[in-house]
Image (spheres, grey):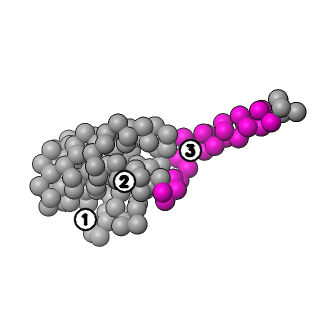
Amino acid sequence: MILVKERIGKWIYCCLTIAILAGGRASADECEEFQLAVSKGELAKVTKMLSLNKSLVNQRSENKFTALFLAAMKDHFEIAELLIKHGAKLEDRAFGETPLYRACMDGSTSVVEVLLKHGAKSR
């Protein structure tokens, strides 16, 4: 009986892991935690969270911003680079703005360079 429970537990864990890695949506709490880590520039935490749930990269928070917008606002160029490598959408819009526009408006010159290097459109 214990072996059956262990096998079922491992099977459920495996299925959940596959669902998450396949792009299952993160919970609101997980998204909030991720975006807070991006805002604070916590590269190690952002890296770890992305490795556990790739869907975080383009999820919007309650304020409608994705993580790339937050990295652009705070000039966290290493995090912006990481997000782009994980599929962050360069031309995504929030309130009519793109991450490039936001980076320009906030004086985040290093993020502007990263975004342009990866093909963000300036028009």
Please give the residue where the numbered disc 3 appears in the rendered image: 20
For mark 1, give the secondary structure: loop
Position above or below: 3 against 43: above
What residue is shown with label 1?
Answer: 97
Q: In the rendered view, does 77 fall on the left or right side of 28? A: left
State the SS at label 2: helix
Of residue 29 and residue 65, the one placed in the foreground of this image is: 29
* Secondary structure at numbered mark 3: helix
Left/right of residue 20 with respect to residue 112 in the rendered view: right
Q: Where in the figure is residue 35, as x and y percent of width and height?
A: 36, 53
Query: Which residue is denoted by mark 2 in the rendering?
Result: 35
Instruction: Please state which of the two labelled residues, at mark 2 or mark 3, is closer to the viewer.
Output: 2
Question: Of the residues shown, which amino acid type is indicated by label 3?
Answer: Ile
Magenta region, residue range: 5-29
Q: Residue at x 42, y 37 (%)?
A: 48
C-alpha distance separating marks 1 and 2: 18 Å
Q: CA distance from mark 3 to mark 1?
A: 29 Å
Q: Is residue 89 visible?
A: no
Mark 1 or mark 2, earlier in chain: 2
